Amino acid sequence: MIEVTALTVRFAGVTPIDDVSVVFPGGTCGLIGPNGAGKTTFFNVLSGFVRPAAGTVTAFGENLLKMADYRRARWGLRRTFQTEMAVEQLSIFDNVAMIHEHSGAKRSARRDDVLSAIEFVGLNANPSSKVGRLGARERRLVEVARAVVGRPRVVLLDEPAAGLPDEETGHLSAVIKQIPERYGALVILVDHDMALVSACCETTAVLDFGKLIASGPTAEVLRNEHVIRAYLGTEEEL
Ligand SMILES: Nc1ncnc2c1ncn2[C@@H]1O[C@H](COP(=O)(O)OP(=O)(O)OP(=O)(O)O)[C@@H](O)[C@H]1O
Ligand SMILES: [Mg+2]
């Protein structure tokens, strides 16, 4: 479980996260909201790139914000980025192994852990193929393999399906859904594809201009009139 209490982030003149309190109970949890709502900023707070002005984040009982950035990776915090981070000139194996090195998992288990992450995401390519030779779908799977390798406890996925045609998100959805069971990790999925969020997430939280406007069971949240209005761009001040 991740508990966020009264979290506020301020940049010059902008408050991308404004007094947000929310619980991510476990399994795969959705985090949605229109462009600029503060979703990536929230991930940046969890991974330590952004220091909040106020608030606390507790993950499985530990005060995440007190933990040094480098320790968060060893602790089990993983994320993907809106832009791909894999190195094109390196093989699939080396791209995944690179993350394993910083994960705190045993060195002797590296080969098995890396190959099992590659197998888990359903990459059919040879692990020694260069990432630069892969198509969009396979590259996305490499990003997910990097996010689950080692011993993840919290996996943050920032728009993993962006740019993929609908017919290719089915497999990704099946993979994301299996992460909690296979790795025992809590997943937070940010995506604009509501079909993907509905398919993967039992619970979903919604941000709009830095404010939490809804959270709870996904089906209920997606029927919430504030949420519908926020997506149509006509939400008034609550
Ligand atoms: N480093 C920064 N300095 C100043 N403002 C920033 C910075 N990073 C983000 N912002 C602003 O914070 C707000 C939230 O941005 P954020 O990237 O978190 O939104 P998002 O919900 O991830 O949007 P999208 O769906 O487009 O990815 C935006 O107004 C953005 O311009
Ligand atoms: Mg974003």
Image: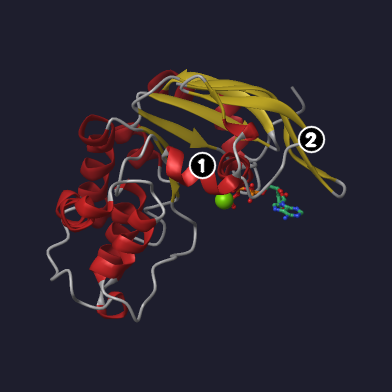
- Mark 2 residue type: Ala
Q: Position of residue 122 (x, y in %)?
A: 15, 54
Q: Position of residue 196 (x, y in %)?
A: 34, 41
- Mark 1 residue type: Arg
Label 2 sits on a secondary structure element that is: loop
Q: Give the quadrant of the N terminus.
A: top left
Residue at 29%, 69% (x, y): give it.
94
Q: Give the quadrant of the C terminus.
A: top right
81 shown above or below 78? below
Mark 2, ligand 1, within 8 Å: the answer is no
For the question of whether residue 49 can be seen, the reply is yes
130 shown above or below 107? below
Q: Which residue is mark 2?
A: 53
Residue at 18%, 58% (x, y): give it.
111
Q: Is residue 73 left or right of residue 116?
A: right
Instruction: Name the foreground residue: 224 vs 204.
Output: 204
Residue at 58%, 46% (x, y): give it.
69
What label sits on residue 72 in the rendered view? 1
Q: Position of residue 195 (x, y in %)?
A: 34, 39
Instruction: Name the foreground residue: 113 vs 44.
Output: 113
For the question of whether residue 191 can be seen, the reply is no
> From the viewer's perspective, is the residue at label 2 or at label 1 nearer?
1
Q: Residue furthest right?
A: 13
Q: Is residue 121 left or right of residue 56?
A: left
Q: Position of residue 30 (x, y in %)?
A: 44, 33
Label 1 sits on a secondary structure element that is: helix
